[in-house]
Image (cartoon, rainbow, N blue to C red):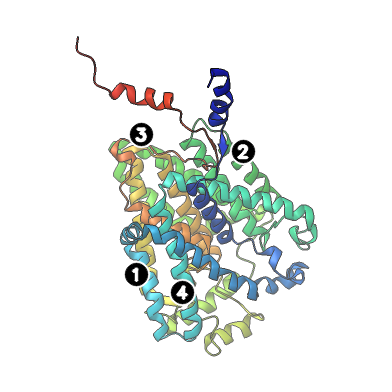
Amino acid sequence: MSVSARLPERRAASTPRLAITQDGAVRAAVVLLLVWYLGPTAPFLPAEAFISEDAKNGVFVEQAFLRLSWIPVYGLTFLLALPHLPKVVRAAARSPYGVLLVALALVSTAWSTSPADTLRRTVGLAGTTLLGFYLVARFEREELMGLLGWAFALAALLSIVFVATRPGVGISGPPHPGAWRGVFPHKNVLGQVMLMGVATGLGLALVERRKRWPFALAGLCGLLLLLSTAKTPIAVAAVLMGIVGLSQLLRRRPGRAGFLGALVVVLVLCAPFFVFVVLEPVLTLLGRDLTLTGRTDIWGLSLAAVAEKPLIGWGYGGFWTAPLGPVLDIRFIIGWDVPNAHNGFIDLLLAFGVVGLVLFLLLVVRVIRANVQEIRETGSWSATWSLAAVTLLMIYGFAESAIMVQNTFAWVLLIALTAYAGKPRAAARGRSVAAPRFRWVARRPATFGAVERKQAPFLPRKPD
């Protein structure tokens, strides 16, 4: 065969072939799971729930479709985790307080005021926790930041498309006319998600200094944050900036590491009170009153119920679904069917009492301490992002029931960050880990010449 006859064959063999790798498919599945955990439920809720603020109770109606949708989510999570089961178990071992809290939720079925609901929600909590442990077993923290970036970007784009196609649902009516909610049930939820997206985008920009897409992610999420008109993120962002500044002082002032580290721990733990007590006058000037929305009345009545069972509580997820008990008195006094305490820490006390609250605080302190130590030793920007994420979760957990709730992104992320806190870091061993892109790339088959050049340096040299 002539050389000219062989040319088409060589060109055909070297032509790139588009192939979706198994790793890329896994990452795509993880991104879709994360998006669903963010809570884009507005397209599946009845339109009557969004007519006005008076119809907000409809948002809390648990639709049959949404409840059944978690069954395939748990199944997919289990299938993804099964090949990495030993690593998942090791990740769980690095989060002992998280495992104890899940076990306590299961045991609380014995004294729950609504055992069936406690058992059902404990199963959901176990599935949510499994996803967090799988993320740690499968990805490095910088990789997880990249996957979260894709999830926030997809949630933002879906919100834009939803507003364009269904503006009557995607945009709020009175008393917040024009405020975007996107694919989320409330404008504040959109604001919370997009604030986390901005923080993740900026964190990725610092981890991947040569990449431009993290800046685009931060800009897109920042735009939707402004369109949501949520004022609380202003105070939260101020606290996060303080956390980032203190964390970087840990690296530059090693002689004061002990003092600065303790200050960071105290600031993170006190961040919710700082936002909602110290910064409230500023937010009031901006038209946002955080305490005169009925929350304080619910908190007082809920704490009175905690005082009846202060040690072990009323059972996980059983207090607000019980057919009898103090919950009926609370709803009668408040005047509507309160679904939760609107405070994650109080709901934790209602579920587990002081025992559960202590375990949760130990879990949070473990995360903060590990990240503070890593920042002090390596100046890691991913550890700084982790510290900022924990702070954000703590703040919003104070205003909403977003602590240790099944089927929520907050618990997935907190469990993952807790397990990362006990994981040996690649940076500590002198290696850096970058957040990779999806491997949906065209791969060019290696030719014999390329293989020969790759192996040539390892061939024995000829004797002189």
Q: Which amino acid does label 2 sit on?
A: Ala
The percent position of residue 327, horizontal first and vertical second, equals: 55, 84
Q: Name the residue under label 2.
A: 216
Q: Give the mark nearest the N terminus, 1 or 3.
A: 1
State the SS at label 3.
helix
Single out the mark in the foreground, 2 or 4: 4
Toward the viewer: 274 or 422? 422
Q: Distance between the residues labelled 3 and 2?
A: 30 Å
Mark 3 in CB contact with mark 2 (< 8 angstroms): no
Quarter of the image where one finds residue 189: bottom right
Mark 4 in CB contact with mark 1 (< 8 angstroms): no
The percent position of residue 298, horizontal first and vertical second, equals: 57, 75
Q: Name the residue under label 1.
A: 100
Q: Which amino acid does label 3 sit on?
A: Arg
Single out the mark in the foreground, 1 or 3: 1
Depicted 272 relative to depicted 379: above or below? below
Q: Give the mark nearest the N terminus, 2 or 4.
A: 4
Q: Mark 4 points at which residue?
A: 123
Q: Name the residue under label 3.
A: 252
The percent position of residue 80, horizontal first and vertical second, equals: 45, 59
Depicted 142 relative to depicted 412: above or below? above
Q: Which amino acid does label 4 sit on?
A: Val
Residue 262 shows up from this direction? yes
State the SS at label 2.
helix
Residue located at (46% from left, 28% from top): 447
Give the class, few, some or many, for how many residues have Cα within 10 Å of label 3's Cα (few <14, many ≥20): few
Quarter of the image where one finds residue 179: bottom right
